[in-house]
Image: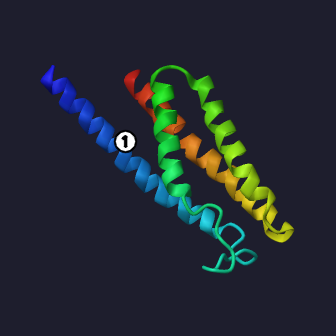
Amino acid sequence: MKQELIVMAFKVVGWLALSYLYGVLVSVVLSKIGQKKWQPVTGKKADPFIHGQLIGNIERTFAMLLIALGNVGAMSMIVAIKGFARWGELSKLDSDVQGIAIDKFIIGNLLSLGFPVLIAAIGFFASKL
């Protein structure tokens, strides 16, 4: 029982570390989208995705938990909640950067939710070997 708890703790810590590193990678990818058109400057234009990395880590953790529980359909709630929460911010942006911000939002969601699905698929196929 004690060894199982230690293994589970290592899995959780490993997942959180991997999720954080993946979040940094997603941030780098998203920073390259629309770079010439939209460069938020402190005090002038607030970046609507300032807490995106933290939200992404939480999102990926919940997605992995839902996958582990076999409730993949509930991942749509994550997308819906984020969509409703960000809609107000995205709709207030200037029209010249709104398309870029929406693209970043969609790409970020796909990359973020695709990661736990990919990890789960790798785990599933590895367990079949």
**Dividing the image into 4 quarters, which one contains the N terminus?**
top left
Q: What residue is shown at x 65% (from left), y 44% (from top)? A: 82
- Quick check: 45 above or below 72? below
Question: Which of 60/77 is in front?
Answer: 77
The percent coordinates of residue 67 (x first, y second) are 50, 27
| Residue furthest left in the image | 2
Q: Secondary structure at mark 1?
A: helix
**Dividing the image into 4 quarters, which one contains the C terminus?**
top left
| Left or right: residue 33 compared with residue 97 | left
Q: Which residue is mark 1?
A: 15
The percent coordinates of residue 107 (x first, y second) are 67, 52
Question: Which of 45/126 is in front?
Answer: 45
In the rendered structure, which amino acid carries the disc numbered 1?
A: Trp
Q: Is there any visible trace of residue 129 in the rendered image?
A: no
Q: What residue is shown at x 62% (from left), y 24% (from top)? A: 73
| Residue furthest right in the image | 95
| Left or right: residue 7 compared with residue 128 | left
Mark 1 residue crowding within 10 angstroms, few (<14) / some (14–19) / many (20+): some
